[in-house]
Amino acid sequence: GGAGPSSNLSSKRGTEDLDFYIGDEAISAASGPGYSLHYPIRHGQIENWDHMERFWSNSIFKYLRVEPEDHYFLLTEPPLNPPENRENTAEIFFESFNCAGMYIAVQAVLALAASWTSSKVTDRSLTGTVIDSGDGVTHVIPVAEGYVIGSSIKSIPIAGRDITYFVQSLLRDRGEPDSSLKTAQDIKEEYCYVCPDIVKEFSKYDRDRERFA
């Protein structure tokens, strides 16, 4: 997410003069006056390219503190990403940032490659099924020898951000004094998990309902 000053301020100043924050800083800034929270990516697709370029710029110059012309960049993309999105990304990195080179890979393929670092993985190939649940969308992606089988991809527009909003709604329903998005996100990251066995999970709830109330 990215935070930018509210519209009444942006009407008085050019976009290049405004303060922008990303990540946790954006959420913190949005809790105060004069700032609002914006998400350049919705359900896995870039919707606001100006904000996305700001996000990349802050990441490169403020956090990585590198000169793009001296480095190569590896970027990820969701499955079935429209070709024009890839072209826009390349245009920004080569023309705006003047990077030395870049490679755009599908997230699921990189996830399979990353699984090789686990001692439990014996078959180190780029063939498998990846469940990729990010911030805005969840995909189930079959990969064969490094190639995504696009016709068999399944997706639902529910992911991490929806869980954050759900936790926030629970806080509000209980009348908690702090039901901010930042608090809900902290609770999600600290206490939420993916259960390996849903039947056992419900059994725990049935045995001790007061604990989960």
Image (cartoon, rainbow, N blue to C red):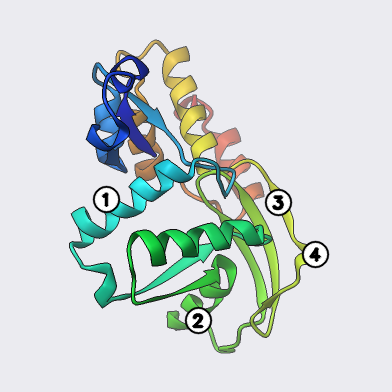
Give me the C-alpha separation between circle 3 and circle 2. Answer: 27 Å
Residue picked out by circle 1: 58
Badge 3: few (under 14), some or many (20 or more) residues near its Cα, within 10 Å?
some
- Nearer the observer: mark 2 or 1; the answer is 1
Report if the CB atoms under discs 4 and 1 are less than 8 Å apart: no
Closer to the chain start, of discs 1 and 3, is 1
Give me the C-alpha separation between circle 1 and circle 3. Answer: 30 Å
Residue picked out by circle 4: 152
Give me the C-alpha separation between circle 3 and circle 4. Answer: 10 Å
Instruction: Tell whether 193 sits left or right of 84.
Output: left
SS of the residue at dot 4?
Answer: helix
Badge 1: few (under 14), some or many (20 or more) residues near its Cα, within 10 Å?
some
SS of the residue at dot 2?
Answer: loop
Residue picked out by circle 3: 155
Q: Position of residue 10 (x, y in %)?
A: 32, 23
Amino acid at pointer 2: Lys
Amino acid at pointer 3: Ser
Amino acid at pointer 4: Ser
Residue picked out by circle 2: 120
Report if the CB atoms under discs 3 and 2 are less than 8 Å apart: no
Closer to the chain start, of discs 4 and 2, is 2
Badge 2: few (under 14), some or many (20 or more) residues near its Cα, within 10 Å?
few
Give me the C-alpha separation between circle 2 and circle 1. Answer: 37 Å
